[in-house]
Image (cartoon, helix red, strand yellow):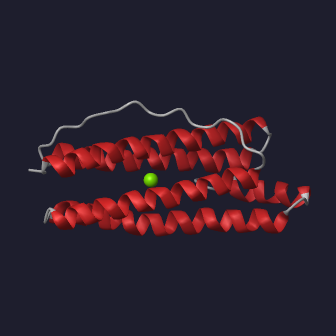
Amino acid sequence: MISKKMQDAFNKQINEEMYSSYLYLSMAAYFAALSFPGFAQWMKAQSQEEWVHAMKFYNHIVERGGEVELFAIKEPKKKWESPLNAFEDSLNHEKHISGCIDKLMDLSIEEKDYASRSLLTWFVDEQVEEEASVGEVVDKLKLIGVHDHLLLMLDKEMGQRGKK
Ligand code: MG
């Protein structure tokens, strides 16, 4: 049985992950409107991954006899100044999520909840990957700068996500 404290914290995290999914879907729509199908595809895949993250917490609560509580999802931003600006926002968001996961890990240690610690270890590793992959795109976009033809090449590369 999961503790009430841990359950409540995981329910909040379901909402964080659902918001992440919404945010990346909004970015996908932004890129689609700009006619960057590759970036849009990458963001759609990212959005789906976040939904899977939310479900990992959902399933964990259910499997341990807890009660799932779903809260309203905040409306995400719709427009960004540039592709770089969108990916910078994405990186900042992932850093925020990493902070949330760290706090959940602190709580699981406090609560001596080994099952939750095991789940959270996966998320700790996942966040390292998330920050690295988004950070790499931010770096590439900075290098590209105003060279539009390179931006189109990167868009093509990004569109390969989920196709390999
Ligand atoms: Mg996530």
**Percent coordinates x, y for residue 59 in the rendering:** 25, 46
Q: Is residue 10 left or right of residue 22?
A: left
| Residue 164 seen in the current view | no
Instruction: Say which residue appears at 14% left-offset and 46% top-offset.
Output: 4
User: Between residues 2 and 106, which one lies in front from this camera angle?
Assistant: 106
Instruction: Say which residue appears at 77% left-offset and 62% top-offset.
Output: 141
Displayed quadrant of residue 92: bottom right
Q: Is residue 2 left or right of residue 14?
A: left
Vertical side of 84 occupied by 136: above or below: below
| Quadrant containing the C terminus in the rendered view | bottom right
**Percent coordinates x, y for residue 35 in the rendering:** 80, 40
**Percent coordinates x, y for residue 85 in the rendering:** 72, 52
Instruction: Say which residue appears at 47% left-offset and 50% top-offset.
Output: 49
| Residue 72 seen in the current view | yes
Instruction: Say which residue appears at 63% left-offset and 66% top-offset.
Output: 135
Vertical side of 39 occupied by 75: above or below: above
